[in-house]
Amino acid sequence: MNKVKILVVDDSAVVRQTLTEILSSDPHIEVIGSARDPFIAVELIREKVPDVITLDVEMPRMDGITFLQKIMSQHPIPVVICSSLTEDGSETTLKALEYGALDIILKPKLGVKQFFEESRILICDAVKAASRANFKKAAFKPMIVQPKLTADAVIAKNTSKAMIQTTEKVVVVGASTGGTEALKELLQSLPEDTPGMVVVQHMPENFTRAFADRLNGLCRISVKEAENDDTVIRGRALIAPGNKHTLLKRSGARYYVEVKDGPLVCRHRPSVDVLFRSASRYAGKNAVGVIMTGMGDDGARGMLEMKEAGAYNIAQDENSCVVFGMPKEAIKLGAVDKITPLRLIGDAMLRECA
């Protein structure tokens, strides 16, 4: 396997050094250079074109958004935005996704061992996912890695029979790399009376609130970042908050969400597997599952559990995915009832909910 070649662009020397150490700890990644601003980055790219660029948003001489637009118009290269953990900058960072960036990762905090290790896993996975993206559609020493946990770490597997089907359906959706724009297209296509939805999009904390607010202004349904005990109702999609697991629960006829802490599951928090497992337990035949573009296998096992509980599951097809990882793994497990292009997912979902 050829190493993924990375160029780090950030005005902070500490961040450049830390990111280089984190990325270099993965045997499948090679950092070929670092730059403190876009002008230096351009000179480095002329010498050697990287497979992926990690890009800060706020830099001297030229901001990251302007540089991103120039890259995408002149020499498209997969870009992962590396941003600070601030709500103030989240709108600007989300704008970068519209201009072609594939993912957002957080600048690591120094001196916090757990955050540093989790950052290492998420950052390395993000750049490897970007390197494998179908880009035409998107326009120090190794550390000990914690075991890749399953949804068992957050919610026990359902051992009872699926609940009796009712007339009220609920939709659960999972997405990762390329998912922000795919979700925008899906949610914009839905009518006001769409069944209640809960969505996990792999995204850092603070950014999910801005993402939900942005979608809320674009869609006929309402969209909000999920809060603990929010009711899942028709005409509304709840977006799992970054760095929190979100579970679907049911009390009588009422569906609601539980937002909670917990370890990384399938290397993510929130995890699609956790959401899908909770849907298998508390919704059963009343659930419709949707798995969309993204690297890895988060959601595949949970979707199989949903199918075994009587749910109907839809996967985005390879041609419309930026990264055909998560849907592919769910399909391989036999967890999917229908494979369809992104533009037809909404219609397939609504037909099953009718």
Image: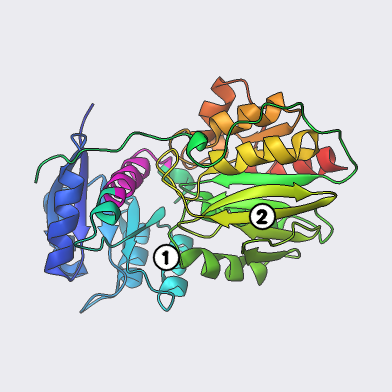
Disc 1 secondary structure class: helix
Instruction: Please state the horizontal and vertical placement of residue 8, each as a whole percent of the image.
Output: 20, 57
In the rendered image, which residue does mark 2 sit on? 257
Residue 128 as seen in the image, left or right of residue 140: right
Q: Does the magenta stretch include residue 298?
A: no
Disc 2 secondary structure class: strand
| Badge number at residue 197 | none
Residue type at mark 1?
Ala
* Secondary structure mainly formed by the magenta segment: helix
Q: Is residue 301 above or below residue 274?
A: above
Query: Residue at horizontal 31%, vertical 49%?
Result: 118
Q: Does the magenta stretch include residue 131?
A: yes
Query: Residue at horizontal 24%, vertical 75%?
Result: 59
Residue 170 as seen in the image, left or right of residue 58: right
Query: Residue at horizontal 40%, vertical 57%?
Result: 101
In the rendered image, which residue does mark 1 sit on? 96
Rendered image quadrant of residue 237:
bottom right
Mark nearer the viewer, 2 or 1: 2
Q: What residue range appears in magenta?
A: 118-134
Few, some or many C-alpha atoms within 10 Å of disc 1 (few <14, some 14-19, many ≥20)? many
Q: Give the spatial CA distance, label 2 vs label 1.
A: 30 Å
Res 88 seen here: yes
Rendered image quadrant of residue 14:
bottom left
Which residue is most to the left? Answer: 140
Rendered image quadrant of residue 317:
top right
Instruction: Please state the horizontal and vertical placement of residue 241, each as a whole percent of the image.
Output: 53, 60
Earlier residue among tags 2 and 1: 1
Residue closer to the observer: 264 or 74: 264
